[in-house]
Amino acid sequence: MKASLLVAVLSLPITAWALEPEVKAAKDEGMRLYNIGHSTVAMPYLRQAAEAGDVDAMYYMGEAERRQHMLGLTREAMEWYLKAAAEGEVYSMLQLFRGGACTAGDRCPDGHEDWRHAALAIAQPQAEAGDPDAMLAMFHIQRMLDQPRRAGDWLKRAAEAGQPEAQTILGNQILDGRGWYLTNGRRRSAAEVWFRQAAEQGYVPAMDRLAATLSNLGQHQEAWSWFVAASELGHINGRRWLGSCYMEPEKDAVCQVEKDLLKGWAIYYAIHEELGNTSSARSLSLRSHMLDESKQQEAEALAEREWIGREPPLSNFPPRFGY
């Protein structure tokens, strides 16, 4: 039995009509949880928005189902991807192809060889018309079509068109060996250009990458300012750098602050309260010897006042596709 593809909906990205306030709040909470790695807990919240017709929520329900089971394309994930794909959601189509929906599940798009080509039919006209988000989608589609050179060309076009995620991916590819550079310093400088363009647009993952690259180039003061900016916008790694530098500024030249054990512990404690995972617990445990119990309690009170529940919320900022 073939799944129908509604070819009348041909825009990237897809957005649903305005959600009712309580449904939007549920979606926001679901995305907060998903973005810190709590996919299973996120699902009841995302489901409310998905069932109300929000295409983003349909896609992320598929992602959460897939990640919950870690078994590839489960039946539940496939059904959500199919619903989003029927509304023209390109990355759902790519997940359907990657999971073998057409071959193993006999859920193929009408009028197309497979889900890659269904995605191509939507993204390519928009990309050729100059849509940067569609250009980024073309990068992923061409990779799935085993066309690495075309994929690289589309990534460069998306980056040059100002798409910040594409700029960040391109910067990472340069650091990983894309292009010819005589020295590591020149390679880092070339990557920095792309990270900076994305960071200056407010793209938080690029701020983190820019900070790390500047640090490797010895530009510690500016690197620190970008780690702080990333932390202020909720990036977990940037927030961890903040806590680490307040507790042990002597350990890294990027730390442009005076030692403040209370503030550092407060930051780590707040991270653990919001994430509640083994990594955040270990971060506290490794530093527990640095403050006695009374100081820890003082720092935790500071966390309650100043760090826990900040807006925007903490996030790993996972990419929409490929996470």
Image (cartoon, rainbow, N blue to C red):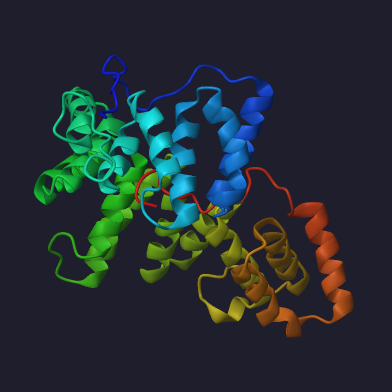
- Residue furthest to the front: 1
On the image, the x and y values in percent for residue 304 come to 81, 56
On the image, the x and y values in percent for residue 10 come to 29, 20
Q: Quadrant of residue 284?
A: bottom right
**Residue 201 vs residue 85, the one in the foreground:** 85
Residue 218 visible from this viewpoint: no
**Residue 1 vs residue 146, the one in the foreground:** 1
Q: How many marks?
A: 0
- Residue sitting at x 38%, y 44%: 198
On the image, the x and y values in percent for residue 308 come to 74, 53
- Residue sitting at x 25%, y 28%: 2
Q: Is residue 23 above or below residue 97?
A: above
Q: Relative to 100, is 113 on the left or the right?
A: left
On the image, the x and y values in percent for residue 123 come to 23, 29
- Residue sitting at x 48%, y 47%: 65
Q: Is residue 20 above or below residue 124?
A: above
**Residue 51 vs residue 193, the one in the foreground:** 51
